[in-house]
Image: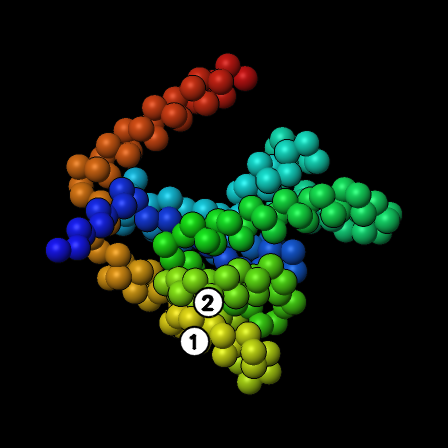
Amino acid sequence: MRKREAKPEKIVVYLAGPMEAVPDGGTQWRDRITPKLVEYFGANIEIIDPCKSEATKLKGIVPDDADVGYVKNAMKGWKASGDYEKFDAAVKRIIEFDLEAVRRSDFLIFYLDFEVQMGGTISELTVAHERNKHTYFVKNGNVTTANSWILGMARATGLFYPNFTQLLEGVEEDFKPYKATKKELKELEKQAEVKEEPAKKEEEKK
């Protein structure tokens, strides 16, 4: 008899969508849904937000506190000045980090904005498609003018939802075994309070 594989301790989600081509760097929708995912799954989920890891990906190339806005401007500057040594090194790391994150994810949430130029998002979609990942989509823009290859691959890979509220309902239904109990959520709140305490004391000193 084949031995049943043990359920992983937690699930991993990657938040995919344009960053370079949108004014906010892709942070707003990610910041809105992250608390909702934590509210449902608690510590049973690892959320990979590429907007939050720019300094980690590019350590030694950009400052340790660099955010997505800083990196966007740095990229533009390197291209404008012809500093392709830094540009190539940075892009190589971003591609390696983000595609590896897609590979290790259990599911992906995509925001496909057909009104802007998408680059890395399409590569991430391709990897998700090849690896048959669970994928959930919300779109922006007119699909009649969308690239047929991109739209077709997305439709073949996962499900489209009219908004993030309904998308999250779909995710919660599909991954219900990982829903956090009330006890687990309370423990998570306590841990967050402990982490916040030193920061509050530092703020009070100022």
Q: Secondary structure at mark 2?
A: helix
Image position, residue 87 (x, y; %): 75, 46
* Displayed quadrant of residue 176: bottom left
Which sits in the foreground, 131 or 107? Answer: 131
- Left or right, 179 with reference to 157: left
Residue drawn at (18%, 43%) of the image: 181
The color scheme shown is rainbow
Label drawn at residue 156:
1
How far across and how far down the image is residue 163, in percent?
40, 68
Q: Residue furthest right?
A: 81
Mark 1 belongs to which amino acid? Ala
Task: Answer above or below: position of 53 versus 135.
Answer: above
User: Residue at coordinates 57% horizontally, 65% vertically from top-left?
Assistant: 122
Circle nearer the N terminus (1, 2): 2
Specify the label residue 129 is tagged with. Answer: 2
Q: Which label belongs to residue 47? A: none
Please say if the residues under marks 1 and 2 sit with CB atoms less than 8 Å apart: yes
Quadrant, the C terminus: top right
SS at mark 1 in the image: helix
